[in-house]
Image (cartoon, helix red, strand yellow):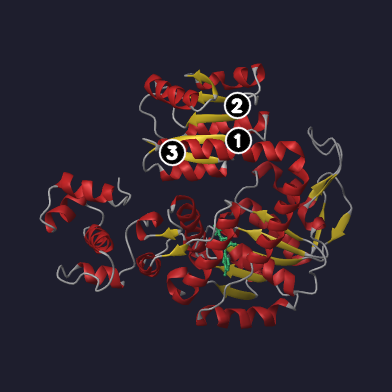
Amino acid sequence: MNEKKRILVIDDDAGILTSLDMLLRMEGYDVTLETQANRLLPHLSDKAFDLVLMDMNFQKDTTSGLEGLQLLDELKKFDDCLPAVAMTGWGSVDIIVGAMRAGAADFIQKPWDNERLLSIVQQQIALSQARRSGNCLREENKLLKRALEDDMDSEWVVRSPAMQHLINVVETVAATDTSILILGENGTGKSLLARFIHQLSSRSEHSIVEVNMGCINEQLFESEMFGHVKGAFTDARENRIGRFELADKGTLFLDEIGNLPLSQQVKLLRVLEERQFERVGSSRTQTTGCRIIAATNTDLKNAVADGRFRQDLLYRLNVIQIQLPPLRERQEDIEPLAERFLQRFARKYNKPKPVLSALARQGLHDYSWPGNIRELSHLLERGVLLCRNNTIDLADLCLPLPVRAGAAGHEQSHNPVNPPETGTLAEIEETLLLQRLRQYDGNAVKAAESLGLSRSAFYRRLDKLKICHE
Ligand SMILES: Nc1ncnc2c1ncn2[C@@H]1O[C@H](COP(=O)(O)OP(=O)(O)OP(=O)(O)O)[C@@H](O)[C@H]1O
């Protein structure tokens, strides 16, 4: 007879533990219950489990999911192959996404559906058994293949006229050795562009060395950038090569250059002007042959005017300037980018690639994308995780407010007798609720009033359609 599969259930709510205990025992599992998060490791050391079912919040009234993430981290460190299924409250989308990123095998929303819960438990135990019984190599190969495909995926999407023009400029300047300054809002693809330029250049056989200039500790700046010799200071136990030396025949990418403190700007300027530097603690002058690409979302002209950025450094960096347009000005890129991200995340989470409903597509075009392509990627990752029946609806995207000024949905929202002309009743209701919320900048009371509904009736409708709200 097959040995019973062992499940550890951790939740601080005794009522939930009792129901899960009954449900899982009836299915023939050997169940261990625990209310304390800090008892995870003692249990794992004590007994071999086949699956852990875990809550994401342990202290009363906490909803951040941070304790759950910490627990997942401990579990994954203890046994990377042990599947953990995260349990969250209904609508805790960010927690679900965080848990899946932290290595949860799947998630269940409370109140759960018994059939779905049992099917997830059974599936995850079977998968982890397959992995343990010698399939690891095959899994690894698959992962490697996917990683390679993901790399191919990060190719540029350049459908919009703005990006096509930009790419023509990039192809011309990439081959030269001139310094390039890339400007653009957060998440517009500055780092990706820097890598792309490096790939197109004659230096592509060598490395592109990336440094986040906003993150280097003031004391360690010179050691990081120029290296040090053993004994140069108390902690210098070995010789260390700096970033300029590492990038010698390749490209040095100075990201977030606008955040570099003035005291460090002057040290950087010297190397850019003279192409020479010394390791900390050494008097031997070395020459660097690296090409410099810098990027920032700061308005450097303003920073110069305010005395926060050196004019001479800007002059050195700014030989060629490339401005990446924000996503809201690249409408033609939105759908091809969305398709690419859907494909990527479907593969990542072992799901078939979902389709976007017509309303979801429209929502993507109407939204203003303050976080640009990175935000699009995060929303679609969430959409892939949460969608049912392989279709991502507008509500699954949980688009934050507000939408672009003058967007179609926004304009329609001022006209109560102008609902969409196609779509099911539920879709039309969803559009109308979202339009009103946008029209009143997320104020549910005013949105409810404008539709002749009470606040609670309005919320009930949002819940029914699974539309996220505060
Ligand atoms: N044109 C594009 N085609 C495909 N993917 C893109 C494109 N531009 C950006 N991305 C993706 O969007 C995400 C954000 O890009 P990236 O990190 O390069 O932005 P960034 O401008 O450097 O951001 P930050 O200012 O926050 O450092 C990455 O996942 C990147 O792969």
Query: In the displayed structure, does residue 399 sit left or right of residue 462?
Result: right
Q: Which residue does the numbered mark 1 point to in the structure image?
A: 125
Q: Which residue does the numbered mark 2 point to in the structure image?
A: 5
Distance between mark 2 and mark 3 Cα atoms:
18 Å
**Percent from the top left, x then y, of residue 9?**
51, 25
Q: Quadrant of the C terminus?
A: top left
Report the image quarter containing ligand 1.
bottom right
- Asked which secondary structure carries label 3, the reply is helix
Residue type beneath disc 1: Ile
Mark 2: give few (<14), some (14-19) or many (20+) Cα within 10 Å. some
Which is more N-terminal, label 3 or label 2?
Answer: 2
Distance between mark 2 and mark 1 Cα atoms:
8 Å
Query: In the displayed structure, does residue 46 sit left or right of residue 202?
Result: left
- Asked which secondary structure carries label 1, the reply is helix
Q: Quadrant of the N terminus?
A: top right
Q: Which mark is residue 115?
A: 3
Residue type beneath disc 2: Lys
Residue type beneath disc 3: Glu
In the figure, 146 relative to 330: above or below? above
